[in-house]
Amino acid sequence: MEQRKPRIGIMTSGGDCPGLNAAIRACAKTAIWSGYEVIGIHNGWEGLLEHDDEVLSVVRTSGIIDRGGTILGTSRVSPLRIENGVQRVKDRFNVLKLEALVVLGGNGGLSLAYKMFKQGIPLVGIPKTIDNDVTQTDFSIGFQTAVQIATDALDRLRSTAESHHRVMVLEVMGRDAGWIATYSGLANGADEILIPEVPVTEQRLESMCEKLISRRNRGIVFSIIVAAEGAKLLGQNITQEKPAGEDSPAPRLGGVGQQLGEIIEQRTGIETRVSTLGYIQRGGTPVSYDRTLATAFGVKATNLIKNKKFGEMTALKGVRIVGVPLEKVSDGIKTVDLRAYAVASKFFA
């Protein structure tokens, strides 16, 4: 009788980002070549709750390294918020005869993964988020692609701003951390970068408007401003109504760019236009850095399982890929290093 191969499961949870498929590919192929059978769990934890999964083969995971999104689908469903959800997950885990799960998640997804690990589910995590706010790792999958998309948008806005002698404001994602705004703004040479870590006070607004007028008086007929959606304008976040059926406990942010644009135009008299990048930052082909990082994380995740180092997350530390305890990851978020932000601000003129 042929001996059954050991099995591992792979899932993606939370928001999607470029590079997820590259990580799935690397994790699955490394596991298959190591003697495992790999089960892809559809739509995050919902897949275990609803018995929605598939066997991942080398063929199924070939040719997806450059594909955006996730072939497994994703969701923000939490078994902890569903009656008997944890037991249902355990039951399905046992029916599938899994040895462990690989969970690709952002800050919230990995915090949930740690809680499920504490409930008795052996798993390892892979950090993925365009916000780059997962602690214990230098970068997360998806961040570099989002920065490139935002930088491209700022570059395009610069040319039309100069042609029409306008101020252009670009609102990018970043609920609690302004990594995308900081990196793309620095790469573009933006004239102001607004992030959640540095509240926009009345004094800051006055200084900003004076600077825009000064640029105009010196013959610089355009200005570029990038604002993270979580930037606190006069001490508060700008929120929107959530669509019907959305059960996320966090408010939906958005609109800081529009409000900022209106303030600038009123106070300076300079024609101001606003663009919101939104979900464009999450989609499309991952840049080479994200593909490489995702591949390294996928290989490391499989090796963590082989060595039974459950409850850990893959992480980039300098040039090394290491495992770190998920317990440390669940402690909070990684905000922008204000030294990096200060470097960017030195070029505001």
Image (cartoon, rainbow, N blue to C red):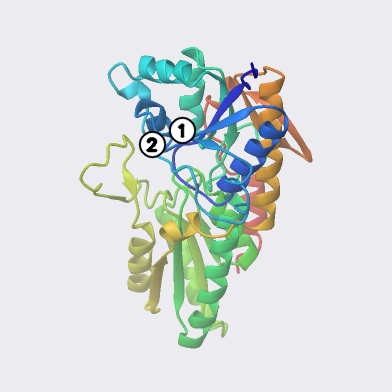
Residue 306 point in image, percent of width and height? 70, 22
Residue drawn at (41%, 58%), measured in percent from left and top?
278
Where, quadrant-wise, is the N terminus in this rendering? top right
Marks 2 and 1 in Cβ contact (< 8 Å): yes
Drawn side of residue 216 relative to residue 245, left or right? right
Residue situated furthest left in the rendering: 244
Vertical comparison of 313 with 148: above or below: above
Circle 2 crowding by C-alpha within 10 Å: few under 14, some 14–19, many from 20: some
Q: Toward the viewer: 279 or 343? A: 279
Q: Toward the viewer: 231 or 69? A: 69
Q: Answer with the quarter of the image where residue 186 lies.
A: bottom right
The kind of residue on which mark 2 rests is Arg
Residue drawn at (51%, 21%), measured in percent from left and top?
114
Name the N-terminal-most of marks 2 and 1.
Answer: 2
Residue situated furthest right in the rendering: 319
Residue behind mark 2: 76
Residue 264 point in image, percent of width and height? 38, 69
Q: Toward the viewer: 207 or 162? A: 162
Vertical comparison of 185 with 33: above or below: below
Instruction: Determine the CA span between mark 2 and mark 1.
Output: 9 Å
Disc 2 is placed on an element classified as loop
Circle 1 crowding by C-alpha within 10 Å: few under 14, some 14–19, many from 20: some
Q: Answer with the quarter of the image where residue 87 lies.
A: top left
Whether residue 258 appears in this view of the structure is yes
Residue behind mark 1: 108
Whether residue 214 appears in this view of the structure is no
